[in-house]
Image (cartoon, rainbow, N blue to C red):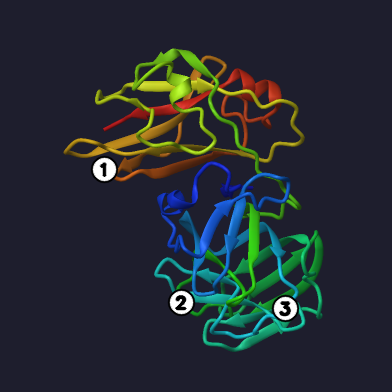
Amino acid sequence: MTILFIEGFDHFSTAQLTDKKNIVDNANCTVGAFGRFGGRGLSLTTNIYYFRVDFKTNKSTIYFGIAFKKVEGQSPVASFAQPWIVIMDEAGVSQIRLIMTANNGISAYFGDGTLLGSTADHVIPNIRWIYLEGKITISDTVGEVTLRVNETQVLNLTSKDTKYGSDYIRFIKFHAINSGIDVYYDDLYVDDAQFHGDCRVKVFVPDSISGTNNSFTASAGNKNECVDEIYSNEDTDYIYSSTLNHKQGFGITTGALGTVKAIQLNNHCRDDAAGSRKITPFIRSNSTDYLGTESDVITSEYLFESDVWETDPDDSNPWTQTKLEAAEFGLEITT
């Protein structure tokens, strides 16, 4: 099992959508109080705009799950040219397109516009949250498109030609349906091995400072208070360093949790000087630092850098409230 990406749309503003390195239009893509549990979610109003997920690696099979709500009761305009969800390869070629039909069913199309198959009508209700999951396998002989709504299978296409581009999947795009019908999204996961069922993504912000990795400087006040906003306030207050191998860690408080599938550490960073910088996220568990994947920091442009840990790296066992609240999370300047 490998969870590749998690998104709850809670830790950034509408203006920061592009900081997630996805192609969007901020006039028609809004992050706000649209979440299904009273938190934040993503609203899309016009089909040509979308939220695109790059899970940073090529996969021949992916599983995804996302909460979805079709706000208005109007019928969609079913059209290959106006897709709902698009599965793309590393070159941006559309391998599979999912279309919501006029009767609130779902049709799956090959990249050239050939219909692969459809669900029954009315599997997507109006004005009610559902949890949509999909399994997509790219192959010219044993391709697969499987869809589930609220953990019930509604489409199972096997032994199909799903390879319109390369052998891989790299991106998923989530659109509106068509102009004039608002849709909401929340609680997304992408995996390469299995379905996880209906999931909820929670966000936790720093509320304590590491006693071991504490090298950065606060722009004002306490370091944890510079980074404790639900979504980043960028240059209002922040922590900073220009020194190689400086590390800064923080603690979090989660409260009671159910089963934890994975955690994703998000750093919102920019480089304010000439030259190249790289950062590496880390988790400190049981007095040992475990490094994630190194990434570039861009001059004068805030971007989110994310890394996923499915289990506690200290013992490879699942995360719990106790483990998370005992751990520290942060970043190191590695170049």
| Residue 247 horizontal/vertical position (percent) | 37, 22
Alpha carbon distance from label 1 to label 3: 44 Å
Q: Which callout, 1 or 3, points to the residue nearer the camera?
A: 3
Disc 2 element = loop
Q: Which mark is residue 332?
A: none
Q: How many C-alpha atoms fall within 10 Å of the one at disc 2: few (<14), some, or many (≥20)?
A: some
Please tell me whether residue 225 is drawn above or below residue 294 in the rendered image: above
Residue at point 52% right, 14% down?
Answer: 287
Left or right: 163 as drawn, with respect to 201? left
CB within 8 Å, label 1 to label 3: no
Q: Nearer the viewer, residue 191 or 321?
A: 321
Residue underneath mark 1? 300
Q: Nearer the viewer, residue 329 or 311?
A: 329
Q: Which mark is residue 74?
A: 3
Disc 1 element = loop
Q: Which mark is residue 165?
A: 2
In the rendered structure, which disc, 1 or 3, sits on the residue that comes first in sequence?
Answer: 3
